[in-house]
Amino acid sequence: MGRIGPVEIIIFLLVVLLLFGGRGKISGIMGDFAKGIKSFRKGMKDPDVDTSQTTSGALVNDPINVTPDKEKSKV
């Protein structure tokens, strides 16, 4: 116990290679994270987007009549 063997060194090198190897994976991940935050902030500030209407043109707060007609229910 307490000694570092060849298996531990290999595991350590694999972890270091995974984190810092290649084309800078950590910097790429952090860059994507920063782009996401910027897009979110831009979306929160953008007053051009009107969220009060759905695709059908009805306002979100308008109630929808779902009661069946009396004439059609008498079959």
Image (cartoon, rainbow, N blue to C red):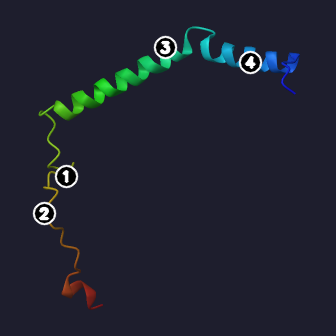
Q: What is the spatial separation of the Cα atoms under label 1 and label 4, in whole angstroms?
A: 57 Å
Which residue type does callout 4 highlight?
A: Phe
Which numbered tag is attached to residue 62? 2
Label 1, label 3: how far apart the Cα atoms are: 43 Å
**Secondary element type, mark 2:** loop
* Residue 27, disc: 3
* Residue at x 20% of width, y 50% of height: 54
Mark 2 vs mark 4, CA separation in Å: 61 Å
Query: Mark 1, residues whose alpha carbon is within 10 Å: few (<14), some, or many (≥20)?
Result: few
Residue 51 locus on image (x, y percent): 17, 45
Q: Which residue in the protein does label 4 denote?
A: 12
Q: Earlier in the sequence, mark 1 or mark 3?
A: 3
Q: Of tags 1 and 4, which is closer to the observer?
A: 4
Classify mark 1: helix, strand or loop: loop
Task: Please report the residue visible at 87 percent of the width from the left and 27 percent of the height from the top.
Answer: 1
Mark 3: give few (<14), some (14-19) or many (20+) Cα within 10 Å.
few
Amino acid type at image mark 3 = Ser
The quadrant of the rendering that contains the C terminus is bottom left
Measuring from the top left, give residue 53's x and y in whole percent. 15, 49
- Label 1: which residue? 56
In the depicted view, which residue is nearer to us: 70 or 3? Answer: 3
Compared with residue 75, is residue 66 higher up or lower down, i.e. above or below?
Answer: above
Based on the displayed image, in which of its 4 quarters is residue 12 positioned? Answer: top right
Inspect the image, locate mark 2, and give the three-letter code of the amino acid beneath it: Asp
Image-quadrant location for residue 71:
bottom left
Q: Nearer the viewer, mark 2 or mark 3?
A: 3
Q: Is residue 2 above or below residue 57?
A: above
N-terminal of the two: label 1 or label 2? 1
Dot 3 falls on a residue whose secondary structure is helix
Q: Are marks 2 and 3 in contact (CB under 8 Å)?
A: no
The residues tagged by marks 1 and 2 sit, at their Cα atoms, a distance apart of 12 Å
